[in-house]
């Protein structure tokens, strides 16, 4: 006999025993009085509550963003009250006081003027024109302290001999000169 067949036979015998149990417990007397005094029938097996398994331990709190949100909602709400509102007159007084303090930290703004003229940019040691020196010289000539160049002109200057003989292409016959024509003076 195989295990499968043995289990089937055992299940069948169990079903027969459960079905015959109420018949075997019934009283043998046929009188109504005996049946009235008979003990109460045994409740079916299905109605007996099964013992409950112990509840599983609580799940660990979620990690990450959702765990932080859970903590936020579980925490008691902090007691917070907004600051008291100021009257319009107090707000204006505060604004005026701040405006007076803001101007005290700024240096005195100097008035800038644009000077026009023509000052040659001297050639520096590396061969480039030094137009900052020309802008300062243009501003000093106009009566100001210092300045920065705004417009620069470049011109090709050739010797009279190169121009008369039409040999401007010869090396050293012409040179480039730069001039500051406008400067911002202070």
Image: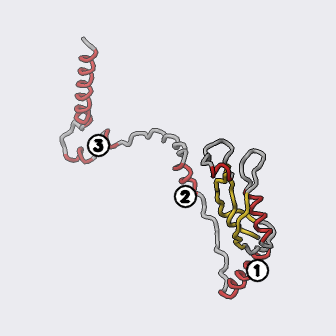
Q: Is residue 140 above or below residue 2?
A: below
The residue singled out by tag 3 in the image is 41
Q: Secondary structure at mark 1?
A: helix
Evaluate whether residue 186 shows in this view. yes
The residue singled out by tag 1 in the image is 100
Q: Is residue 112 above or below residue 94?
A: above
Please report the residue visible at 70 percent of the width from the left and 68 percent of the height from the top: 117
Q: Residues within 10 Å of mark 1 (few under 14, many from 20)?
A: few
Please report the residue visible at 64 percent of the width from the left and 70 percent of the height from the top: 80
Q: Which x, y percent locates residue 40?
A: 30, 45
Nearest the eye: 123 or 5: 123
Q: Which x, y percent locates residue 185?
A: 74, 69
- On screen, residue 32 versus residue 64, left or right, reads left
Marks 2/3: CA–CA distance: 55 Å
Q: Which x, y percent locates residue 23?
A: 22, 34
Q: Quadrant of residue 95?
A: bottom right
Q: Residues within 10 Å of mark 3 (few under 14, many from 20)?
A: few
Please report the residue visible at 73 percent of the width from the left and 46 percent of the height from the top: 127
- On screen, residue 150 versus residue 144, left or right, reads left
């Amino acid at each position: 006999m195989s295990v499968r067949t043995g289990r089937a036979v055992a299940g069948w015998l169990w079903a027969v025993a459960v079905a015959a149990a109420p018949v075997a417990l019934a009283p043998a007397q046929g009188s109504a009085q005996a049946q009235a005094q008979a003990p109460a029938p045994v409740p079916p097996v299905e109605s007996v509550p099964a013992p409950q398994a112990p509840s599983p331990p609580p799940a660990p709190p979620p990690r990450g963003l959702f765990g932080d949100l859970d903590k936020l909602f579980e925490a008691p709400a902090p007691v917070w009250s907004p600051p008291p509102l100021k009257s319009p007159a107090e707000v204006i007084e505060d604004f005026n006081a701040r405006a007076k303090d803001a101007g005290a930290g700024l240096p005195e703004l100097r008035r800038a003027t644009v000077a026009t003229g023509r000052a040659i940019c001297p050639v520096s040691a590396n061969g480039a024109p030094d137009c900052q020196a020309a802008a300062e010289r243009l501003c000093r000539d106009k009566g100001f302290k210092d300045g920065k160049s705004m417009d620069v002109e470049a011109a090709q200057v050739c010797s009279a001999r190169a121009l008369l003989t039409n040999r401007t292409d010869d090396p050293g016959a012409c040179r480039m000169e730069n001039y500051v024509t406008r400067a911002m003076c202070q």
